[in-house]
Image (spheres, grey):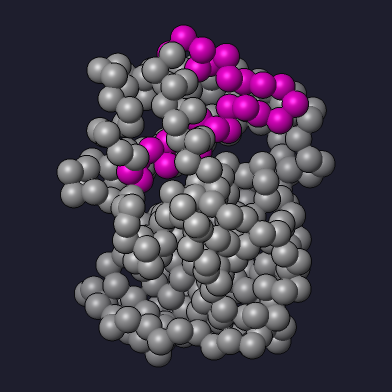
Amino acid sequence: MTPRRTSLILHQYDFSNFAEKARLMMGFKGLAWRAVEIPPIAPKPKLTPLTGGYRRTPVLQDGADVWCDTKLIARELERRVPQPTFYPPSTSGMADAIAWWAEQQFMRPTALYVSGINADHMPEGLHADRAKLHGLPMPSIEAVRKAAFRNLQLVRPQVKWIADMLSDGRPYLLGDAPCIADFATYHVVWFFRGRHIDCREVLAPYPRLLAWRERMAAIGHGNRIDIDADVALAEARAATPASPRPSEPQEGDPLPRQRARVRASDNARDWIEGEVHFIDADEIALLHENDEVGQVAVHFPRLGYDWRSMS
């Protein structure tokens, strides 16, 4: 199948597991897309002008619109390319619950295990950067190593849960086709390949899980073209944010054209401020002004994020 050409740009780095989720989602949708390689740690001088200060990976860009967090990136890709779907009706509700578990409960101990085992082989400054991101003190390398083995005890039973879901021979977690639960779970399993020291032996007792992993990997990344960050900044500068869909604010929400601020709710310190461009039960978008790119619309999911009205 010829990849569907798009103007989408994914700001990512290659060893990011959340970026792998986004890359695989692009492949599933059959898209041609562009990639900007960003630093894995702060500062990120050619990303933050687009995001108002949000610095997590990945970020999806189309002109002067930017989508943060793979939960919302998945919804935006689905809105643009409904088929094949991440959200088949037969898995509704259950798939989102499994995806939330994978990213909120399975990912963290897996990251601490794999990063701890590879403590001496991670990029310089990564441990300090991640501690700062979560509002934690700088850990020693020895503390990181010890955390690896503590977290392995949390990882193993959750790996078995995945294997149990596949124990009846189904090809994907919830049936005959992949859904958002598969993509959210796969990117954590993908992370076991580690960096210098391979951690995939945790998966070895489960051949059906390994077969599912290979089926997911075979989806591929679509047609990726690498570009320089300055190209992405120039495209944002030359564009204006797309007209928003009609907002559907909930009780107590800031209204369009009012000022608000947003941040990730897991101890993140950095608020992103701007004028509300769009808001509904699932998403809030802020208009943000920056000298380098002008006005951009930065889109966030509601779930997993805090907001505060500034009006």
Identify the image quadrant of residue 244. Answer: bottom left
Residue 258 visible in the current orientation = no
Image location (x, y in percent) of residue 112: 59, 31
Please state if 107 lies on the left or on the right of 278 as rendered: right
Please state if 195 lies on the left or on the right of 26 as rendered: right
Q: Residue at x 67, y 21 (%)?
A: 198
Quadrant into which the C terminus falls: bottom left
Q: Residue at x 71, y 35 (%)?
A: 139
Identify the image quadrant of residue 190. Answer: top right
Please state if 44 lies on the left or on the right of 265 as rendered: right
User: Magenta: predominant secondary structure element?
Assistant: helix
- As drawn, 195 above or below 282: above
Residue at the limit of the structure toward the left, as seen here: 90
Residue 169 visible in the current orientation = yes
Give yes or no for residue 220 being in the magenta stretch.
no
Residue at the limit of the structure toward the front, as seen here: 1
Residue at the limit of the structure toward the top, as seen here: 205
- As drawn, 177 above or below 169: below
- As drawn, 226 above or below 248: above
Image location (x, y in percent) of residue 266: 48, 50
Image location (x, y in percent) of residue 150: 56, 19
| Frontmost residue, 169 versus 143 | 169
| Frontmost residue, 239 versus 147 | 239
Q: Residue at x 79, y 28 (%)?
A: 120
Q: Which residues are magenta?
A: 179-206
Give yes or no for residue 181 being in the magenta stretch.
yes
